Image: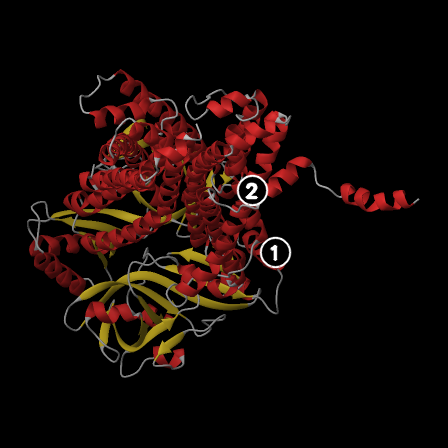
């Protein structure tokens, strides 16, 4: 009885024992994470990037939804182009709740000095703002600030206007034919995000002031928006029902409807696109880091060769050996993913603190489980995809081969099961990247490009080794050793080329794309583009405007065309919102677009399908369409489209398709109608003025001053100023993209360091043998430096060539701009790769050269 009782505790302990692979893995992990720093860094970096981007995007999306009512200025908004709502339409909206009227348009602000600038004019009624609060400096009630005093209306302006016109609060400016006193600066505009991006400073005036300014002419590019605040606290379903009711009851009115559920659609689309890009950057970092994972695990197996040999010698199966080390890798992978999740989850909070007061973005930082789970899945699948292969190789390697591995590395492939597991994990990672993406087409292209890059890099490394093996041997011993190290069994060549190649290709491509855009903006476009675009010239003033331009600048080129705004409401008889179109062309169905009419084909375009109508055509309305847009909207010659212009729907048949040469910078439109389509309709004139022989700032600004004085309701856009503003935006975006892509470069550096560390044991063995044979430290250092320089140089050339090809494809095929090779930028990126390879290689080699032969020879 006592024997049984004594046995029970032992039996109880054995009942709770973990399986042998888990116990062995747990004991091995007690030694810490030494040797897994690169492994942890690569996983944590990629996971943090994806988790941070996803959480930041979700925070912005939820912020937009939470603040949608304030951003929109109500529960719903209904906009019209060119015209105000009719009394019947306004009565319909007033029956749904309180109404605030807002009119926005571009115009020119003129100071007493004669200087002028483009402004974003916003006219509001007494009910604005219904949601949120507008603040000014000095603070005062809006009706008081905008009222008529001493014969002038009041205005609250963006502080930027004061700097552009060199004026101050209290000064008087002219807009249209009216005078305005600047009575305050506008410090907060609650619905600013819903109005989109403007090209000029905001000027806030009253609705009566706009109507008295002379700017509201038939066909003027003014947008009337009616914000509706429903009574009480309406639910989302009630808001949707409101939009459906107005659409049904005001059918054919041309209302562009939005609700608080989608208050800033353009901003949301931009957030989604930027999230897509940054997620791909994070995935690129994770995939590059996957190479580091594979290198780290290979080095781990290499360090454990004696342990594996001993386990197999005492009867451990290959499956047990695999499971022991897979459990260790899984545990460390979980740690790396956890570190990445913590860092990624903190990014929205850091961004909210950093951007507070700088950008009017409604960021709502929080912990988002779905985004963190997605990042964890990416990290886990990456670790598994790159771990199965090197771990699987240890399964069938015999004990003798493990002990011989230092001098005769075994390069057999793992079992079929491990190769299949690797393929399944990689396929799952690729599938997740595609199905979780905002744009699956782009994500699919990324996956295909990544696979192609891996194959290309592997082929390049094999090619380097094959060429090195066939080159004649140099006479200098150091160069002979360096060349031999490039192609010997167990060479670092595949690891180094793979580690640095992907990151370098991305860096070179981004550098050259940025350079091509900047060159297009700063050099090529200014030479082709006119000096000015003039908008809102009444059709009755067109001839007088041309005469004034000719008198003031006889050497200038003058071109003009009629211009209206219209929205596509139907395609082939089907409502546009229900039409099946390509996603990248759906933008054309959102809001209104510029349209024109002409008896002849516009310059800078070529009819490639169908025929142009006769000059005296008087039949049913016809329209000429841009070929690319027509393909995206799935239109062909003979199809019908409906376009709402000035509240009237025009149904026209597609007569022909044109190839538009936008690079000529001439006046062109996606849609050109036959002249009879808009017979009798009021319209404005769009004009351009250019100086083929060039003109200085004084000449251009003098002409602008004269024209804005003679035509006060006209709006002028100076191309040079617009290009400068665009170049600044592009510069900021390029900086943000480079900073984000720096994550991939950091991952590449980590992977390179890991690849060099993975060959540490063999390097020690080589150094010991060579020292025993009489090699000095200087000669060994020179040999290793030459090897790293050769590998870095080849990788740099590869990155330069492939990155340039990628940049060329993006610039010419996607962006449709001329590609320009920037030798300084691209060469600098390649030089960075070369220096990194040499420096990191020599840092790791220096410690190896200090090893004494005796200690290692005793272990052989």
Task: Select label 1 or label 2 by which is in front.
Answer: 2
Residue 451 tag number: none
Left or right: residue 776 versus residue 324 is: left
Image-quadrant location for residue 677: top left
Circle 1 Cα neighbour tier, 10 Å, few/some/many (<14 / 14–19 / ≥20): few
Residue drawn at 38 percent across, 48 percent down:
566
Residue 241 tag number: 1
What is the quadrant of the C terminus in the image? top left
Residue 705 visible in this rendered orientation of the protein: yes
Q: Say above or below: 846 vs 60.
A: above
| Residue 622, position as x, y percentages in the image | 36, 36
* Element type where label 2 sits in the image: helix
Left or right: residue 302 versus residue 842 is: right
Residue drawn at 10 percent across, 57 percent down:
697
Q: Say above or below: 860 vs 718.
A: above
| Residue 568, position as x, y percentages in the image | 43, 44
Q: Which residue is mark 2?
A: 377
Q: How is the image coloured?
A: secondary structure
* Element type where label 1 sits in the image: helix
Between residue 559 and residue 445, name the one nearer to us: 445
Give the farthest residue toward the right.
Answer: 1
Image-quadrant location for residue 653: top left
| Residue 602, position as x, y percentages in the image | 24, 38
What is the quadrant of the N terminus in the image? top right
Q: How far apart in space, not on screen, are marks 1 and 2 (Cα)?
A: 39 Å
Circle 2 Cα neighbour tier, 10 Å, few/some/many (<14 / 14–19 / ≥20): some
Between residue 238 and residue 766, name the one nearer to us: 766
């Amino acid at each position: 009885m006592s024997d049984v009782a004594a046995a029970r505790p032992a039996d109880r302990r054995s009942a709770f024992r973990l399986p042998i692979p888990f116990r062995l893995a747990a004991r091995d992990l007690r030694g810490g994470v030494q040797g897994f720093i690169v492994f942890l860094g690569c996983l944590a970096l990629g996971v943090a990037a994806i988790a941070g981007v996803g959480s930041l995007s979700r925070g912005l999306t939820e912020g937009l939804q939470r603040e949608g009512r304030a951003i929109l200025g109500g529960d719903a908004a209904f906009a019209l182009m060119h015209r105000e709502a009719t009394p019947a339409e306004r009565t319909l909206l007033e029956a749904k709740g309180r109404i605030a009227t807002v009119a926005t348009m571009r115009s020119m602000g003129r100071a007493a000095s004669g200087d002028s600038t483009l402004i974003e004019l916003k006219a509001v009624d007494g009910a604005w703002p219904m949601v949120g609060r507008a603040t000014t400096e000095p603070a005062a009630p809006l009706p008081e600030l905008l009222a008529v005093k001493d014969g002038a209306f009041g205005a609250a302006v963006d502080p930027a206007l004061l700097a552009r016109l060199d004026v101050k609060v209290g000064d008087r400016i002219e807009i249209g034919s009216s005078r305005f006193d600047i009575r305050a600066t506008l410090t907060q505009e609650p619905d600013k995000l819903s109005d989109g991006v403007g090209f000029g400073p905001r000027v806030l005036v009253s609705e009566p002031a706009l109507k008295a300014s002379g700017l509201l002419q038939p066909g003027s590019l003014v947008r009337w928006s009616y914000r509706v605040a429903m009574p009480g606290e309406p639910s989302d379903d009630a808001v949707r029902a409101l939009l459906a009711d107005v659409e049904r009851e005001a059918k054919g009115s041309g209302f562009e409807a939005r609700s608080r559920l989608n208050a800033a659609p353009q901003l949301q689309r931009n957030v989604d696109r930027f999230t897509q890009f940054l997620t791909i950057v994070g995935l690129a970092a994770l995939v590059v880091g996957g190479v580091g994972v594979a290198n780290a695990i290979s080095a781990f197996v290499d360090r454990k060769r004696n342990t594996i040999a001993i386990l197999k010698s005492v009867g451990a199966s290959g499956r047990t050996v695999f499971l022991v080390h897979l459990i260790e890798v899984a545990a460390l992978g979980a740690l790396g993913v956890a570190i990445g999740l913590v860092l990624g989850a903190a990014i929205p909070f850091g961004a909210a603190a950093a951007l507070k007061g700088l950008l009017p973005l409604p960021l709502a930082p929080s912990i988002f489980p779905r985004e963190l789970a997605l990042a964890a899945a990416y990290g886990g699948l990456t670790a598994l995809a790159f771990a199965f292969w090197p771990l699987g190789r240890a399964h069938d390697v015999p004990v003798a081969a493990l002990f011989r591995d230092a001098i005769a590395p075994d390069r057999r492939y793992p079992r079929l099961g491990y190769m299949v597991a690797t393929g399944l994990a990689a396929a799952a990672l690729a599938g997740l990247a595609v199905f979780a993406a905002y744009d699956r087409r782009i994500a699919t292209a990324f996956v295909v490009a990544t696979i192609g890059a891996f194959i290309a890099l592997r082929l390049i490394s094999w090619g380097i080794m094959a060429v090195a093996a066939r080159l004649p041997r140099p006479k200098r011993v150091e160069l002979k050793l360096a060349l031999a190290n490039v192609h010997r069994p167990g060479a670092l060549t595949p690891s180094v080329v793979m580690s640095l190649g992907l990151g370098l290709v991305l860096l070179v491509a981004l550098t050259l794309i940025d350079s091509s855009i900047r060159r297009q903006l700063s050099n090529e476009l200014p030479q082709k583009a006119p000096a000015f675009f003039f908008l809102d010239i009444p059709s009755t003033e067109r001839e007088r405007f041309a005469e004034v331009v000719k008198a003031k600048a006889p050497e200038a080129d003058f071109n003009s065309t009629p211009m209206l705004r219209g929205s596509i409401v139907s395609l082939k008889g089907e409502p546009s919102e229900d039409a099946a179109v390509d996603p990248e062309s759906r933008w054309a169905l959102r809001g209104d677009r510029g349209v024109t009419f002409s008896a002849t084909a516009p310059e800078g375009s070529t009819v490639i399908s169908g025929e142009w109508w006769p000059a005296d055509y008087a039949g049913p309305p016809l329209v000429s369409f841009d070929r690319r847009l027509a393909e995206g909207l799935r239109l062909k010659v003979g199809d019908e489209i409906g376009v709402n212009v000035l509240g009237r729907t025009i149904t026209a048949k597609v007569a022909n398709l044109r190839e538009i040469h936008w690079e000529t910078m001439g006046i062109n439109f996606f849609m050109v109608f036959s002249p009879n389509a808009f017979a009798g309709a009021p319209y404005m004139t769009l004009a351009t003025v250019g100086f083929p022989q060039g003109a200085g700032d004084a000449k251009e600004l003098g002409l602008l001053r004269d024209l804005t004085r003679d035509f006060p309701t006209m709006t002028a856009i100076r191309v040079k100023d617009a290009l400068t503003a665009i170049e600044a935006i592009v510069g900021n975006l390029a900086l943000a993209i480079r900073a984000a892509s720096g994550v991939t470069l950091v991952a590449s550096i980590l992977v390179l360091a890991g690849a060099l560390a993975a060959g540490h044991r063999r390097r020690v063995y080589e150094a010991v043998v060579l020292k025993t044979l009489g090699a000095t430290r200087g000669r060994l250092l020179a040999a290793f430096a030459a090897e790293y320089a050769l590998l870095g140089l080849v990788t740099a050339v590869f990155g330069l060539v492939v990155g340039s090809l990628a940049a060329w494809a993006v610039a010419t095929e996607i962006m449709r701009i001329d590609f320009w090779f920037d030798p300084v930028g691209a060469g600098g990126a390649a030089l960075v790769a070369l220096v990194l390879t040499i420096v990191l290689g020599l840092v790791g080699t220096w410690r190896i050269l200090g090893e004494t032969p005796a200690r290692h020879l005793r272990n052989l």
